[in-house]
Amino acid sequence: MSWEKLLKKDSDLTLPRGKEVVLQAEDKDYERGLLVKLLKNGGYEIAYWYDEHKPYPIEVLIDGKSIKKDAKKVTMKFHPKKELK
């Protein structure tokens, strides 16, 4: 699905602030997914899990460039832009 279509779609899930949510991949061969937490400051803490619901090392790419090959947690910070008038 394209980003344009996703932007027009209603949310599939609403994350509660401060609570880690376990997302599981639709996968017949492995138990895996993401641990996601909406932080108080508006950012997100994300970790990949495999077999157990705890952070599992995974390669992280940013804008297509490998940053770390064994990362366990990724934090994305929220920096809202002010509207220019």
Image (cartoon, rainbow, N blue to C red):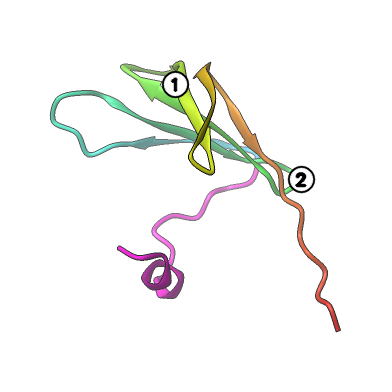
**Residue 24 location in percent, x, y?**
32, 35
Q: Which residue is drawn at 39% across and 71% down?
A: 9
Amino acid type for the residue under numbered disc 1: Ile
Q: Residue at x 53, y 44 (%)?
A: 63
Q: Which residue is drawn at 50% across and 55% down?
A: 14
Towards the viewer: 3 or 19: 3
| Quadrant position of the C terminus in the picture | bottom right
Q: Can residue 55 be seen in this view?
A: no
Q: Earlier in the sequence, mark 1 or mark 2?
A: 2
Amino acid type for the residue under numbered disc 2: Asn
Residue identified by numbered label 2? 41
Q: Residue at x 50, y 33 (%)?
A: 61
Residue identified by numbered label 1? 58
Towards the viewer: 32 or 66: 66
Residue range of the region highlighted in magenta in the rendering: 1-17
Q: Main secondary structure of the magenta part?
A: loop
**Residue 64 location in percent, x, y?**
48, 40
In reply to whether residue 11 is colored magenta, the answer given is yes
**Residue 51 lies in what quarter of the image?**
top left
Furthest-bottom residue in view? 85
Circle 2 sits in a helix, a strand or a loop, which is it?
loop
Q: How many labels does the image show?
A: 2
**Residue 49 location in percent, x, y?**
40, 23
| Quadrant position of the N terminus in the picture | bottom left
Towards the viewer: 41 or 82: 82
Circle 1 sits in a helix, a strand or a loop, which is it?
strand
In reply to whether residue 28 is colored magenta, the answer given is no
How far apart are the two marked residues, 1 and 2, measured between alpha carbons? 25 Å
Furthest-right residue in view? 85
Q: In this view, does 19 lie above or below 8?
A: above
**Residue 28 lies in what quarter of the image?**
top left
Q: Is residue 77 visible?
A: yes
